[in-house]
Image (cartoon, grey):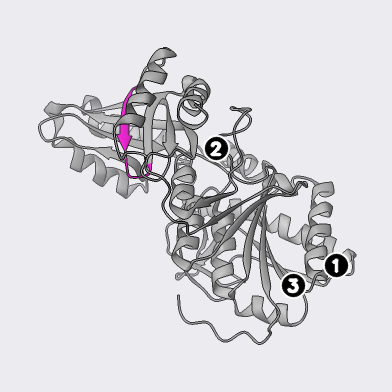
Amino acid sequence: MRPMRARRSAVSIVVQKFGGSSVADVQKIRKVADRVAATQASGKQVVVVVSAMGDTTDDLLQLAREVCENPARRELDMLLTAGERISMALLSMALNARGVPAVSFTGSQSGIITNDSHANARIVEVRPYRVQDELERGKVVIVAGYQGVSYKKEVTTLGRGGSDTTAVALAAALGAEACEIYSDVEGVYSADPRVVPDSRRLAEISYEEMQELAEAGAKVLNAQAVEFAKDKGIAVFARSTFGGSGETVVRKLAPGAPGRVVGVASERDLVLLQTGAENGSALAELLEHLDARGATGKQLLFEKGGASSLLLSLENLPDYAALKADLAVRFGGRVAVREGVGAVSAIGSGINATFANVRKSLAALQAAGIEVLGLSTSSFRISLLVRAGHLPEAVRRLHAELVTG
């Protein structure tokens, strides 16, 4: 990022982000407005980042698919960014109706500059001059999350959960005292409470562990946002919009005890692409084919003289049907496509200091009759591929064995 001009006020800035469930209807938007107004009344300058209302993004995606089986990513970005613009305008209206001066900005108006990768862009620079000007005028600034503008002046989106990244990026550029992420849960838990009722809320968690949890499927915070926060040294507070005193603070922490498992996450809607040992040359061709279509892989395993496998997530791949058809035409039987795959992951600093946690994970799933389709490890993660229908039970088994056991 380029150096920002000096702030003209000693008043501290707070960036608050509210997710789709927090602004799902008019009543909830009014409650968010009350919370924002109270923050400003406490003497803070407030920047608010909002997601689209409820299931708006999914509804817009469905509309696009009804119009066209394989919509262009540029046009999808133009369509999907409308969801956040609706939220920002309504919240601004609600605040002004309360006598709290507020102004709403799109991602481009607020200075969010990205690369030109439609549907999954990355922020490369923030120029929040208009945001700073309006804060100095005493206004609450509301920014549409999930979106920006490329250096080619194209509207772009940041991928699922990208509103978190918008909030952290603005907090860094503005020198904010805090970045608060509000959702429908009180912070980050050791597992999804809807799947594991006895999961524990984590009072604090390191950047690295939180990023791994997010990449493994935990929905409270976006992985790219955590990466941004780590790079800029910003503490992120995950809180509930709907009350309660619980929270989780994400920040730099000393490494935990080797082998400690802080949580278990899962991800469905994965596709496994495999090339056999006899088709080793197909791998490079496959990767080139995927790159040309903007399909990024989550995990790659290659063994000389053996089979290769590549894991794709459908979350940021709206044109999967077309990609699948292309693969069949281009590669035929050289690339096998396996759908209905999910991943369950255990996360913790030094989790693989020994093989104990891997052995426990395999034994726990075997005892439950859950077939393991694949396994991978890193310094912070153990991930096991299973059939998507087995994910809830796999999460419960690993949590009981590694977290509460």
**Mark 3 residue element:** loop
Q: Position of residue 143 (x, y in %)?
A: 66, 64
Q: Residue furthest right?
A: 98
Horizontal arrangement in the rendering, residue 260 relative to residue 104 (left or right): left
Q: Which circle's residue, 2 or 1, is located before the other in the chain?
A: 1
Nearer the viewer's eye, disc 2 or disc 1? Answer: 2
Q: Secondary structure at mark 2?
A: loop
Q: Quadrant of residue 173?
A: bottom right
Distance Cα–Cα, label 1 vs label 3:
17 Å
Amino acid residing under circle 1:
Asn
Q: Are marks 1 and 3 in contact (CB under 8 Å)?
A: no
Q: CA distance from mark 2 to mark 3?
A: 32 Å
Query: Is 162 covered by the magenta stretch?
Result: no
Residue placed at 78% from the left, 74% from the top?
A: 43
Say which of marks 2 and 3 sits in front.
2
Residue 12 sits in quarter? bottom right
Mark 1 or 3: the one toward you: 3
Q: Is residue 176 left or right of residue 316?
A: right
Callout 3: few (<14), some (14-19), or many (20+) C-alpha neighbours within 10 Å?
some
Residues drawn in magenta: 372-380
**Residue at mark 1:** 96
Q: Which mark is residue 44?
A: 3
Q: Position of residue 73 (x, y in %)?
A: 47, 50
Quick check: 210 above or below 193? below
Question: Which mark, by number, is residue 190?
Answer: 2
Is residue 401 positioned above or below 129 on the image? above
Question: Measured from the top left, where is residue 5 in percent x and y?
Answer: 55, 86
Badge 3 amino acid = Lys
Q: Quadrant of residue 219?
A: top right
Residue 159 vs residue 247, the one in the foreground: 247
Name which residue lies at 62% across and 32% down.
Answer: 193
